[in-house]
Image (cartoon, rainbow, N blue to C red):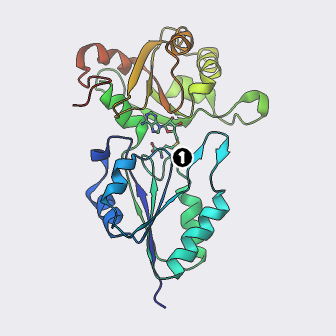
């Protein structure tokens, strides 16, 4: 039987219109769609009526399917000759484990393509009125996992380089670890007055943003009960929100 193909597709950050034209085509032509938790379910309405829709999502601490099961699923469906679309939140190459999935597909000799998407660390700030670079405020931008915890020996972030070398920093998966993030940045030389924002459910109807600085943002987040999924954005660019906030949070535009 003819081999199928797997499209590893970025679904964008939340607003269903923020998927690429090619990503949408991959949804429309798929026989099987394996989708993650953070994708907007509206997008699945574009699937063929007889497409098989399989939730393979992970929430923090919980796994619907373990990664190996996802690999087996992609391989077996493609070997049946099917068009498989693996739909991931944001961009599949940014904390999306696309490398692992592409690697096993390559080993199994299954054709695949990687379809980029708009990542939350850029899009959520944009919808909050914060451009991640700006000629006057930020010439560099770093994407970092906020997951690591020093006490668990998982913290392999070069905090000194980050604190001193990157103007804007977007932490993914960082909201539960905010205290550690702020403490480390301050300890490694970033001013405690550096502006910081936390944006939850960016680009969706439920978007909420809070703003403070490295010294205050953790208590502001606790007060506002902001939780996962959220982007923690650190840098002078956060101040631009005062002037160029355009997206009305909580109201569809
Ligand atoms: N591949 C995704 C990131 C997956 S890691 C991308 O490129 O965007 C999951 C983390 O992404 C979450 O913990 C959160 O930090 C961030 N995230 C994803 N969607 C988000 C959204 N709509 N608003 C804010 N943060 C989001």
- Residue at the front extreme, as displayed: 49
Question: Ligand 1 closer than 8 Å to the CB at disc 1?
Answer: yes
User: 203 or 134, which is in the foreground?
Assistant: 203
Horizontal placement of 59 versus 129: left or right? right
- The image quarter containing residue 238 is top left
Residue 132 visible (yes or no): no
Point 53% across, 81% down: residue? 79
Q: Mark 1 = which residue?
A: 95
Horizontal placement of 62 versus 168: left or right? right
**Image position of 145 with respect to 128: above or below:** below
**Image position of 68 with respect to 37: above or below:** below
Q: Position of residue 113 (x, y in %)?
A: 42, 68
Q: Position of residue 242 (x, y in %)?
A: 29, 13
Point 31% across, 65% down: residue? 28
Q: Position of residue 116 (x, y in %)?
A: 38, 55
The quadrant the C terminus occupies is top left
User: 147 or 37, which is in the foreground?
Assistant: 37
Residue 136 visible (yes or no): yes
User: 133 or 21, which is in the foreground?
Assistant: 21
| Image mark count | 1
Q: Residues within 10 Å of mark 1 (few under 14, many from 20)?
A: some
Point 55% across, 80% down: residue? 109
- The image quarter containing residue 120 is top left
**Image position of 92 with respect to 22: above or below:** above
Horizontal placement of 140 versus 228: left or right? left
Q: Position of residue 87 (x, y in %)?
A: 44, 57
Which structural element holds mark 1?
loop
């Amino acid at each position: 039987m003819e081999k199928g193909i797997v499209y590893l597709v970025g679904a964008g950050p939340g607003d269903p219109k923020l998927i690429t034209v090619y990503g949408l085509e991959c949804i429309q032509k798929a026989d099987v769609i394996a989708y993650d938790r953070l994708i907007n379910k509206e997008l699945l309405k574009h699937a063929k009526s007889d497409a098989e829709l399989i939730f393979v999502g992970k929430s923090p601490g919980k796994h619907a399917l373990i990664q190996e099961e996802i690999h087996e699923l992609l391989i077996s469906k493609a070997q049946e000759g099917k068009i498989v679309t693996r739909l991931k939140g944001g961009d599949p190459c940014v904390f999306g484990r696309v490398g692992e999935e592409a690697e096993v597909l390559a080993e199994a000799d299954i054709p695949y393509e990687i379809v980029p998407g708009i990542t939350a660390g850029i899009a959520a700030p944009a919808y909050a009125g914060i451009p991640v670079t700006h000629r006057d405020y930020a010439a560099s931008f770093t994407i970092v996992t906020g997951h690591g915890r020093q006490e668990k020996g998982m913290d392999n972030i070069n905090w000194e380089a980050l604190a001193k070398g990157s103007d804007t920093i977007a932490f993914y998966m960082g909201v539960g670890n905010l205290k550690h993030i702020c403490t480390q940045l301050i300890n490694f030389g970033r001013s405690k007055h550096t502006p910081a924002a936390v944006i939850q459910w960016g680009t969706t109807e439920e978007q909420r943003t809070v703003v403070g600085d490295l010294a205050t943002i953790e208590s502001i987040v606790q007060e506002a009960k902001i939780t996962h999924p959220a982007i923690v954005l650190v840098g002078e660019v956060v101040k631009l929100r005062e002037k160029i906030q355009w997206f009305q949070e909580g109201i569809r535009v």
